[in-house]
Image (cartoon, rainbow, N blue to C red):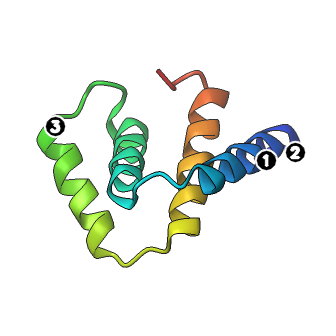
Amino acid sequence: MTPNLKYRAEKFYQHLIKSNFPFDAMCWALAELQLIIEKGYKKYSENDVIKRAEEILDSSIEYDKLCWFIASFKIYLEGIGKYP
């Protein structure tokens, strides 16, 4: 990750932490980002997202790590022009 992308990811991470979004909504967001990376935008079903979000919920991931993954994946996808 370039210094600029890392800076943007850190800023977005701080925004997510401060916003205190519901945990299940954050799991859904991470599931969608992972599926975009794996399959491409809109090339997955709602059932794919539900299954992945449930896996994330069951993983016992901590909220701060969830925020970091979301921020990193979002900024990465923006950097390669794949974020919707």
Amino acid type of the residue that numbered disc 2 sits on in the rendered structure: Pro
As drawn, is 73 to the left or to the right of 29?
A: right
Residue that label 2 marks: 3
Report the side of 17 relative to 50 (left or right): right
Q: Amino acid at mark 3?
A: Glu
Residue 12: quadrant of the picture: top right
Q: Are marks 1 and 3 in contact (CB under 8 Å)?
A: no
Asked whether disc 3 touches disc 2, contact meaning CB atoms under 8 Å apart, the reply is no
- Furthest residue toward bottom: 60
Residue at screen point 56% across, 39% down: 74
Q: Residue at x 42, y 42 (%)?
A: 33
Q: Nearer the viewer, residue 18 or 4?
A: 18
Q: Choose the circle earlier in sequence order: 3 or 2.
A: 2
Q: Amino acid at mark 1?
A: Lys
Q: Is residue 45 left or right of residue 75?
A: left
- Crowding at mark 2 (Cα within 10 Å: few <14, some 14-19, many 20+): few
The answer to whether marks 1 and 2 mark residues whose Cβ atoms lie closer than 8 Å is yes
Residue lying at 47% horizontally and 51% vertically, measured from the top left: 21
- Circle 3 is placed at which residue position? 46
